[in-house]
Amino acid sequence: MRRIYFLVPDLATTKRIVDELLLSRIEERHIHVLAKRGTPLEELPEASLLQKSDFVPAVERGLAVGGTAGALAGLVAIALPPASTVIAGGILLGSTLAGAGVGAWAGSMIGVSTANSRVKQFEEAIEAGQFLVLADVPKKRVAEIEARIKTHLPDVIVEGTEPIIPAFP
């Protein structure tokens, strides 16, 4: 999946884009709309915390850093004289999992409180009253969807795509 960003000037055009995406067989759960705080979106699918924050990248970084730190701590514990080689695998596995868990938790706490770095570049336009539409589409259909939107709504600005979308947001 790839995430396409559309910067849209008004609510009526945003509704037409969402309708066009739905007609293109993009499920509603893969369409997200961001607007200035207090702007009524009516029946449009509003972006959730996962799209507004850096939650997913922060959890991924926390898993990696915590798992690495846990593995290193396990290796240090194995190297100490009282540790037996019989239980060395358990110590290493346990410390790696514990480190990954703590890292993911800490990363999620930091990520939830941090604005999405990709959306941050659209902050001025959103505050000026424009709408940002995020659409998660299959890789093979990115060009088709962009062309279809541009054909029907030439005033819409396609702001590019994000290379990889996590499977669960």
Image (spheres, grey):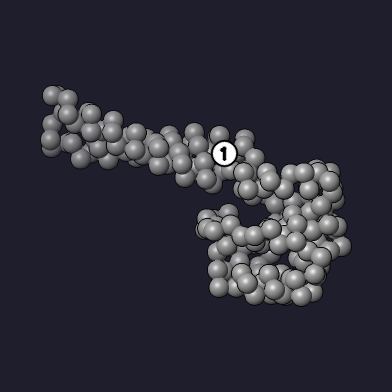
SS label for mark 1: helix
Q: Residue at x 46, y 41 (%)?
A: 61
| Image location (x, y in percent) of residue 55 | 57, 43
| Residue 15 visible, this orientation | no
Height in image: 25 above or below 50? below
Residue labelled with disc 1: 111
Q: Identify the image quadrant of the C terminus.
A: bottom right
Q: In which image quadrant can residue 10 be found?
A: bottom right
Q: Residue at x 74, y 51 (%)?
A: 34
| Image location (x, y in percent) of residue 6 | 72, 60
- The kind of residue tagged 1 is Gly
Judge left or right: residue 165 versus residue 72: right
Q: Residues within 10 Å of mark 1 (few under 14, many from 20)?
A: many
Q: Residue at x 61, y 60 (%)?
A: 161
Q: Residue at x 84, y 46 (%)?
A: 128
| Image location (x, y in percent) of residue 48 | 67, 49
Judge left or right: residue 69 versus residue 153: left
Q: Identify the image quadrant of the N terminus.
A: bottom right
Q: In which image quadrant can residue 31 be found?
A: bottom right
| Residue 160 visible, this orientation | yes
- Front one among 118 and 53: 118
| Image location (x, y in percent) of residue 117 | 62, 44
